[in-house]
Amino acid sequence: MIFNSEQKNIAINLLVKLDFQYTKTIIMLGYPSTKTLKKWYLYYLEKGYFVNKKTTRVRFSKETKSKVLEYYYEIGENISKTVRYFGFPSRATLSKWISEYDKNKPSHCLANKPVVKYNNTLVKEITKDIILNDVPLHRASSYLNISATTLYNWRNKLLTNAGAIMNKIKGESNTTENILEDKINTLQKKYNDLQLEYDILIKAQEILKKEKGVSISNLTNKEKADIAYALKDNYQLNVLLKVLHCAKSTYFYHYNNRDKKDPYEQLRKELHNVFNSNYQAFGYRRLYDYFKKTSLKVSEKIIRRLMKEENIIVVNHKKKKYMSYLGEISPAVDNLLKRDFKSDRPNKKWLTDITEFHIPAGKVYLSPIIDCYEGYVVSWTTGTTPNANLANKMLLNGIKKLNKNEKPIIHNDRGCHYRWPEWINITKNNGLIRSMSKKGCSPDNSACEGFFGRIKNEFFYGRDWTNVSINNFIILLNKYLTWYNNSRGKRSLNGLTPNEYRSLYYK
């Protein structure tokens, strides 16, 4: 910051009044620094005052100006060389002298005056002539009275713009071609991918006899290998395996074993036969128990794998059960079993209940007696009405199968069928011991409920009963219960049927 003499005088006077307190003086004035104020004070002591400095201009005589201009024209009107030769004046001053001497000379190079602006068309024409005719710039400069530097800049600018325009045109052309080429390649790739997937799905229907709508993700590794083998002449193997999500090692494993005979061909057929002939109710455990009794020896793991490959599935369903509770008709008896459904001998603990089968032709009711020893169905009755006769007849048929001195506990829920006087009299007259579940507590009779669930999953659910009459349904139900006793092996009985296990006790 530059301070004038007045500001300096004010600062010195205030400093004297404040008894040379520099800091306070600076705070009050806001200027200068302590060092500068001390410097001013020393200068004031020496001179006694401050005077504004004025620069004086150097004035040149007409003879000097003429001498300089004469030299300027002799060397070819070069301002820089003239200034260096004499050591004076400045370039701007010399330019001013030149314009004063030659008023017709363009003033584009003179200081403090507007720069001469040439028309763009004129600039291009001049530059083109210089470039095409290969004219040296210093000759063109003296002829056109334009500095060589300006001509040099014009030439470079024209050449640069021309090159940029050519590159841009060429670049735009290349860019458009590249974009079109990329789009074509992308569309071609998509088309090839779709064609490959289409061929895979068609080949899956032809070779594997798959239905329409087959998904690649649902194919087995062997099926994927067969499809890849069938299409390997049309597509690269790596591309096929990538689309099929199949490892190369997996493909070659099945490829090398494609001519080998399936060692489980006969077992596959037997699996379907046994599964379908047993109400499609056997899972891999019961199938394993079945084949243990035959000449076909096979592990559970193989059966489970073959069931998966052959799509052998046991379907389970759940429906609302039938309930026969109508209130407290007669006094309830105690629950003697207390959910202990194990028995060490036959005809010691019996369970009973009534379940409902609802088919299009009507409703059918089943009332069985289940022995806790092995799950054997001691007796059963079927009918279209869940009345007392249904339960009483079942009980009387079961009593006929008892040996001497066998007085089982008969356990049931609080249904009305088991609280009528006739049911109570039958149990008393034959020495049976009554037991009842708590009200609305199905777990108290869970073993019997589980039996009903097995019947409905294996025999009833998942089948079409539209054209089946009630009489035919009862015949089929009786046939199933006979099969249940004599042919259906149980894991809890080491694969034996209830009848086989029961016979072992009476041997």
Image (cartoon, rainbow, N blue to C red):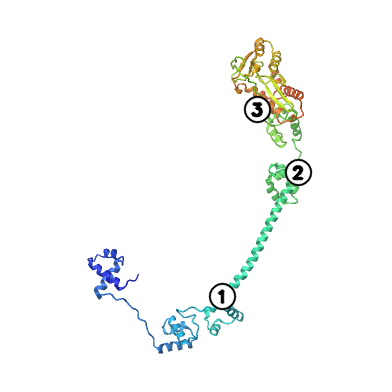
Q: Amino acid at mark 1?
A: Asn
Tags 3 and 2 touching, CB below 8 Å: no
The quarter of the rendered structure image containing the C terminus is top right
Check disc 3 and report the residue beneath it.
320
How far, Cα to Cα, is label 3 from label 2? 41 Å
Q: Is residue 507 visible?
A: no
Point out which mark residue 88 bears: none
| Label 3 element class | loop
**Which mark sits nearer the N-terminus, 1 or 3?**
1
Crowd band around label 3 with a 10 angstrom C-alpha radius: few (<14), some (14–19), many (20+): few
Q: Residues within 10 Å of mark 1 (few under 14, many from 20)?
A: few
Distance of label 1 from label 3 (alpha carbons) = 96 Å
Tell me the tag on residue 156: 1
**Looking at the picture, how far across and down is residue 19, in whole percent?**
22, 66
Q: Are marks 2 and 1 in contact (CB under 8 Å)?
A: no
The N terminus is located in which quarter? bottom left
Q: Comparing marks 1 and 3, which lies closer to the viewer?
A: 3
Callout 1 secondary element = helix
Name the spot of residue 336 as percent of width and height, x first: 59, 16
Looking at the image, which is closer to me, 342 or 32?
32
409 is higher (above) or lower (below) than 139: above
- Which sits in the foreground, 195 or 419? 419
Left or right placement of residue 273 versus residue 454 in this view? right
The amino acid beneath tag 3 is Lys
Please give the residue where the numbered disc 2 appears in the rendered image: 205
x and y, in percent, of residue 305 in the image:
69, 35
Q: Looking at the image, which residue is at 65% across and 27% down? A: 320
| Quarter holding residue 393 | top right
